[in-house]
Image (cartoon, helix red, strand yellow):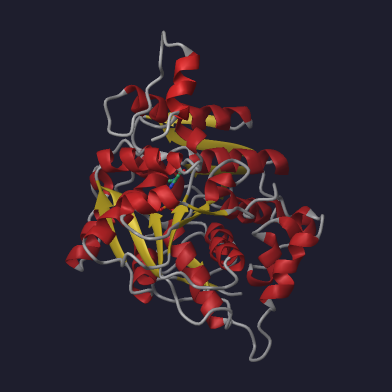
Amino acid sequence: MNLVCSECGRAAAADAMFCASCEGLLAFETFAAAPGAAPDRDRIAARRNSNDMRDRSGVWRYRDLLPPIPFDSIVTLREGDVPVYDAPRSAAYAGVQRLSCLHLGMNPTASFKDAGMTVAISRAAATGARVAICASTGNTSASLSAYAARAGISAVVLVPSTGISEAKVAQTLDYGATVVAIDGDFDAALETVRAMDPQRVAIVNSVNPYRIEGQKTAAFVLLEQRGWRVPDWIVLPGGNLGNTSALGKGFREALALGWIDRLPRLAVVQASGAAPFARAFRDKADLIPVHAETTATAIKIGAPASWKKARAEVAASLGTVLHVDDDAIADARAIVGRDGIGCEPASAATLAGLRQLAGNGTIGAGDDIVLILTGHVLKDGAYAANYHESAAPFANHILRGVDPAEVIDRLNAPA
Ligand code: F0G
């Protein structure tokens, strides 16, 4: 698999992080098999039956489609093999007949980052890196720290000093990373990381093409569980836009291999206060960075690094990009909980976005739709607690001073 510049197409050195000619992001070329030699999807899926963690991993069982990494260097926590849930209450809320959720929050560190991090850290381990770094709104940092701990690599994370989930920082500290709080937002932190020398430290933000290769396997894991039936729409949150580029690549590769016969359309949802990609898409223009503000802190990103790659994927899928306000995200997050699923705020932007797209007819009520839930509900417990103490429409207030027996009677009473 060749590493090339995603912008000018020039070949890149195996250990480069950006294009030496134009500084564009690098990407592994779309996986293509020799005619008649496409890897057998059922043989790959059957690796689930093995007890080797690398076979059970939803990422590494698709190793035939990943950049080559020595098998012994693989650092895995058995990530990627996450469930697809049906979500009837969320469907009703959005105004569609049926809906399912690929819950990437069911990964080892409770976010989608693990699928990419296992590949980035395995690569770092294989090349002898001693230190790895990322900028983060919290989830990348937790994921990096866990995989680095497993690999015996030192992790350094740069996080905004305010406005990210305490639970994510605590998780990161727990895994033993060095946490550096910076006076600035995610965009400033990423700029600092991008300026670092990749020979001295492994940079594992989603500008690292190995991250994207790992994250693309979420498309395969989803399709595998659906018996390779392609949904009409995939709805996912957009922040730095690495995941949009990864999922788009995964579906395109599945199509190129003949595993599926068409692409699902990608709908990327941003928070209104952090929606430079939605604006660029609407205006058919280049992205103009913004100062991001949203309570969905995971996607509080104003200068997304992967916007060009993401734009190409949205276009290839005949998709769309939109934004939803913070109140809509908050309500949608509570509704996902009512399905017994739960997710963090950024993930719930998907349901709020679907509601908008179903409302304006972009998505049909009978369409086959999958939401990509990117983080677990416990990633931001404080946000959930505040919502339920508020006067918001779906707040579930704690009862005090009531007789539990009366509560049971009320719940048993015929409707
Ligand atoms: N959802 C969650 C829960 C996230 O943590 C992120 C990004 C996104 C969606 C957006 O994904 O950046 O690939 O478009 N979190 C990063 C972090 C920035 O540092 O944890 P994207």
Residue 57 relative to residue 182: left or right: right
Residue in the image at 17% along x and 65% along y: 283
In this rendered view, identify the residue nearer to me: 353 or 194.
353
Residue 409 position (above or below residue 305): above
Question: Residue 105 location in percent, x, y?
Answer: 53, 45
Residue 296 relative to residue 109: left or right: left
Which image quadrant: the C terminus?
top left
Question: Residue 112 location in percent, x, y?
Answer: 53, 50
- Residue at the extreme bottom of the image, as rendered: 35
Determine if residue 303 is in view: no
In this rendered view, identify the residue nearer to me: 331 or 195.
331
Determine if residue 281 is in view: yes
Quarter of the figure with residue 130: top right
Which image quadrant: the N terminus?
bottom right
- Residue at the extreme right of the image, as rendered: 51
Question: Residue 133 location in percent, x, y?
Answer: 54, 43
Residue 138 position (above or below residue 226): above
Residue 155 position (above or below residue 115): above
In this rendered view, identify the residue nearer to me: 281 or 51.
51
Residue in the image at 42% along x and 33% along y: 414
